Image (tube, grey):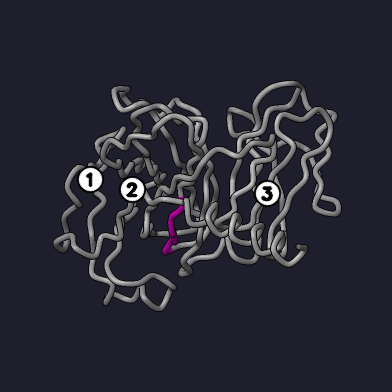
Amino acid sequence: MKKTLFSTLLLSAALQFNAQTTIFEETFDSTPDYSLPSGWNNNSLNDTLWKWYCQPGSLGTNAMGFSGKIASVGKYNTTDDQSLVTPVITLSSGNSYLLTFLIGALGAEQRYAVYVLPAGNTFTGSETPVFEETISQERIALSQSIDLSEYAGQDIKVYFRTFGLNRVNSSAGYYLDNVRITQQPQLATSEVFLKSSGVGVYPNPTADYVYLKSPSKITKAEVFDSSGRKMNTSLNDNKIDIRNLLPGAYVVKMTTDRGSYSQKVIKK
């Protein structure tokens, strides 16, 4: 009887894992060189000359950890502000969603941000990003994951916004590949747990602590407010103390030796 029950549990877990569905994916491999896939667009906030385009993977990016063709954009001024925009993506109600992508930079300390807007909205740059970071290590493909479950039931567009040169580099560039949104049934608990990656950020909402779970070693955890300002928190035994934070919405960014994952968390 125990053996039968254990087998049933394994089968149930396997079915839940396989329930994950890719609803949007772009690898850029079928896109003609120096153009963009159908439905993708450039969005410049200050008439930036250099635009995003698809480049062959043979130009050295395969050595960085990318594969095949990628999207890229060059940076030559501190005022450059260019976004790569996805087509309209429909996120049905009653499911959780995860955005994953590979990103890298030519030139260290280059900043980028990811925004998610309703499809009919106009991007102004004043919106709050769902994710933002400065790439400290250049010439390496970084794997990023962002929870989009709060946008379920909406038609959205994703904006990959790249900023101008920092003071160190005379020129720089960004590389993007394997943009994917996956869907899986909503979990029945308050824990935001991604079965596909083994990552957990819980409980949510919470009044005191945020617990982190990952199959890979957690090397860093940061908390940001809605304006992108980093909060004064620390990671201790895979637990973040947020008792001193004001009630509201925050973004927890967990970094592991295999990439990073960001999750919106509500402080009660």
Name the residue furthest front: 1
Q: Earlier in the sequence, mark 2 or mark 1?
A: 2
For the point 18% across and 60% down, which residue is it? 31
Label 2 to label 1, Cα distance in Å? 29 Å
Total marks placed: 3
For mark 2, give the secondary structure. Answer: strand
Residue that badge 2 annotates = 24
For the point 23% across and 44% down, which residue is it? 40
Left or right: 133 with respect to 58? right
- Given the image, on which type of amino acid does mark 1 rest? Leu
- Given the image, on which type of amino acid does mark 2 rest? Phe
In the image, which residues are magenta?
A: 100-106
Quarter of image, res 8: bottom right
Q: Nearer the viewer, mark 1 or mark 3?
A: 3
| Mark 3 crowd level (few <14, some 14–19, many ≥20, 10 Å Cα) | many
Please name whichever residue, 26 or 198, is drawn nearer the observer in this view of the structure. Answer: 198
Q: Can you tell which mark lies on residue 49? A: 1
**Does residue 90 lie above or below 167 as drawn?**
above
Residue that badge 3 annotates = 200
Position of the N terminus, as image quadrant, is bottom right
Left or right: 10 with respect to 237? left
Please name whichever residue, 13 or 158, is drawn nearer the observer in this view of the structure. Answer: 13
Please name whichever residue, 96 or 224, is drawn nearer the observer in this view of the structure. Answer: 96
| Mark 1 crowd level (few <14, some 14–19, many ≥20, 10 Å Cα) | few
For the point 45% across and 31% down, which residue is it? 152
- Residue 103 in the image: state x and y as whole percent: 44, 58
Position of the C terminus, as image quadrant, is top right
Left or right: 92 with respect to 243? left
